[in-house]
Image (cartoon, rainbow, N blue to C red):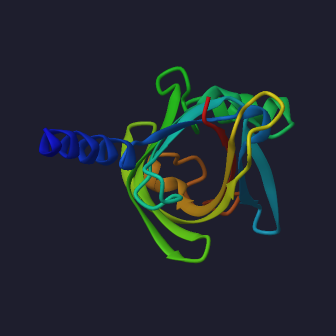
Amino acid sequence: MKKSFLLLVVTLFSIFGFAQTTWKADPMHSSINFSIKHMGISFVQGRFNKFNGTLQENGDGLAGAKINFVIDAASINTDVEPRDNHLRNADFFDVAKYPNISFTTTSVQKLNGNSYKINGMLTMKDVTRPVSFAATYGGKTKADEKGLVRMGLTGKLTINRFDYNINFDPTGTGVGKDVDITVFMEFTNK
């Protein structure tokens, strides 16, 4: 009887000890931003207004987390409507044919302190490629007035738009080839 009880306690402890928590991106407190060189002299900045994502953690901050994101490509916003419409057409994102941009982690490694390296697969248009980027884990809050616990994360990466068949201006003189992406995420565990 004692052995059965002990086995039950160890089993329950193992299950709860390795339980995963799923966090959902809070779009009211998050943003996906980008900047790209224009005419070789300045930058155009923008963001995607619609996205959803989850982060599944195993209790060790971000180490070993699984992150999945889907961005509505048509929600691109540079605050210039004619430019945004051009970015939605076949010269750039071709949102009628490829409505989503997605990211899924392959691994998350703790570097030191609150610094992590996130590796994953980024899909844009008809291309899926591996990417790695630096992330800073902002920590967690206690439950707010709505009973939500929140987690923060910031990430930065640079991609070559030509790698994703965004080939407008193939010389890269008018519209640069490198796109700097900065992600500010706040997740809730509701």
> Which residue: 52% across, 48% down?
167
Apparent side of residue 154 relative to residue 56 in the rendered image (left or right): right
Horizontal and vertical percent position of residue 79 = 86, 37
Furthest toward the bottom, the residue is: 112
Apparent side of residue 85 relative to residue 14 in the rendered image (left or right): right
Q: Nearer the viewer, residue 90 or 136?
A: 136
- Position of residue 139 relative to residue 87, above or below, is below
> Which residue: 21% across, 46% down?
6
Apparent side of residue 68 relative to residue 152 in the rendered image (left or right): left
> Which quadrant of the structure image shows residue 63?
bottom left
Horizontal and vertical percent position of residue 2 = 16, 44
> Which residue: 74% across, 30% down?
147
Horizontal and vertical percent position of residue 158 = 58, 63
> Which quadrant of the structure image shows residue 178?
bottom right
Horizontal and vertical percent position of residue 18 = 35, 48
- Position of residue 63 relative to residue 164, above or below, is below
Query: Looking at the figure, which quarter contains the C terminus?
Result: top right
